[in-house]
Amino acid sequence: MDHFTYKNGVLHAEDVSLAMIAEAVGTPVYIYSRATLERHAQVFKAALSALPRTHIAFAIKANPNLAVLNVLARQGFGADVVSGGEISRALAAGMKAQDIVFSGVGKTRAELAQALDAGIGQFNIELEEEGAVLAEMAAQMGKTASAVLRVNPDVDAGTHAKISTGKSENKFGVPISEAMGIFARLSGLPALNLRGVACHIGSQLFDLAPLEAAYARIGELVSELRAAGHGIDRVDLGGGLGVPYERDKVPPSPADYGAMVERVTRGWDVTLMFEPGRVIVGNAGVLLTRVIWVKPGVARPYVIVDAAMNDLARPAMYDAFHDFEAVRPTGERMVANIAGPVCETGDTFAMGREIDAVLSGDLAIFRTAGAYGATMASTYNSRALVPEVMVDGERFAVVAERVLPEALIAAEHVPGWLRN
Ligand SMILES: Cc1ncc(COP(=O)(O)O)c(C=O)c1O
Ligand SMILES: N[C@@H](CCCC[NH3+])C(=O)O
């Protein structure tokens, strides 16, 4: 359930008309509902309530907006981060360093130092050398790094190849077959508190079976590690739950997921860490756009909107589906292609789709755009960086400004030697 519904024939975010936001802020613009964010956070927490010890680290790559992070921090969420920039954001949003998990296959020494300095709660080590370097840096800084080893369980998550992370050929984690040896070598190092393992097999998952298979392998590994004398008190189960981009394709619910986790991890006696991203923010956001033209096409018209692949990259990158709805639907329908103004054939949101009939000047939304939307935006074609708005009941605020081409131009320099 979300809070983007029609009232008196006009699409609203909570109690605010999207037409009003378009008037005040312009288009394209991302719009988030605070109530939906809170509801999703609560549903996820409730789904894990039967588990003895848990910590939720929101994968902030899905939506790093400070206002969004602030709402989730109030729900007790920490952050799963993958860069120094994300560490800075999580801290700026009021998340505690102890509640931050640092994942990523290419953490630089500067980022490791930043994380150690901040005192972040968990490093997810992705290769042996990283663990050794982390231990050495921690010792030099007089700190102890709390860490888990990310293993690659070689499970096919059954999702889009570009967002699958748990197959042996993917770049993430250490092969599960090598985990015992790496653990033994790293756990002897001073300044490194290697206390558990992690896995994350992919995103937008629609089937719990691959997750269950991966978790079962992790469970066996935990037993083997303990039998070898290692103290294990944490297991990080990653994120990945899918969301319904298409109304009739419904993923497993957080409750189904929680029940599976409870069954598989029974008796593990560890703190379970979770890194959900999309499932928390996906349906809490829409991208509001205005139709520029309805351009006649060969088989059907092109609805050309003022949002483009630089604002919402998912359709161009993964052939992703985002529902398109008019803000003031007339009840008429049309079959059309939907495309943006960018000079790429791939700047197409849909081909031959039945949609609400729209005319030039009409407002419409792309749904389920709260995850991997604004954060993946660029300024390609010298377009403005898309702004973000948060709605809370009857009020709304711009939570990320539109960055205009003029500001981007001002940040560039033509060297003196090119001027004469
Ligand atoms: C390590 C890690 N954790 C968590 C996530 C969040 O995934 P999702 O948004 O699918 O829940 C990702 C992205 O897939 C990730 O790479
Ligand atoms: N950007 C991807 C998800 C990436 C997941 C990163 N671990 C998407 O929009 O679906």
Image: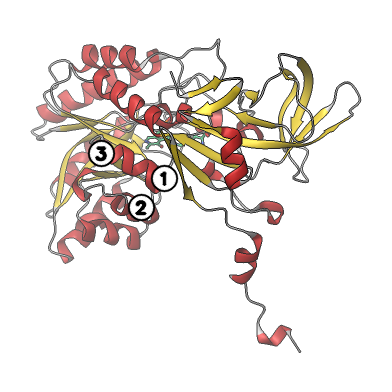
Q: Nearer the viewer, mark 2 or mark 3?
A: 3
Ligand 1 contact, mark 3 (Cβ < 8 Å): no
Report the side of 109 relative to 419 (left or right).
left
Q: Position of residue 31 (x, y in %)?
A: 51, 37
Which percent across, then down, holds residue 202? 44, 28
Locate residue 90 relative to residue 267 in the image: left or right. Answer: right
Q: Which mark is residue 141?
A: none
Q: Quadrant of the N terminus?
A: top left
Element under label 1?
A: loop
Toward the viewer: 70 or 377? 70
Farthest right residue?
298
Q: Quadrant of the C terminus?
A: bottom right
Kind of residue indicated by mark 3: Arg
Q: Are marks 2 and 1 in contact (CB under 8 Å)?
A: yes
Q: Position of residue 21 (x, y in %)?
A: 56, 40
Colouring scheme applied when the structure was drawn: secondary structure
Q: Do the residues under discs 3 and 1 have CB atoms within 8 angstroms?
A: no
According to the picture, the residue beneath numbered tag 3 turns out to be: 74
Residue identifier under label 1: 64
Q: Residues within 10 Å of mark 2 (few under 14, many from 20)?
A: some
- Considering the numbered disc 3 on the image, is that residue within a helix, a strand or a loop? helix
Separation (CA) of disc 2 from disc 3? 15 Å
Classed neighbour count for the residue bearing mark 3: other residues with Cα under 10 Å, few (<14), some (14–19), many (≥20): few
- Looking at the picture, which amino acid does disc 2 mark? Arg
The residue at which mark 2 appears reads as: 89
Instruction: Give the alpha-carbon distance from disc 2 to disc 1, as whole Å.
Output: 7 Å
Query: For the view shown, which residue lies furthest in the front direction?
Result: 8
| Label 3 to label 1: alpha-carbon separation | 15 Å
Residue at x-position 38% and y-position 41%: 68
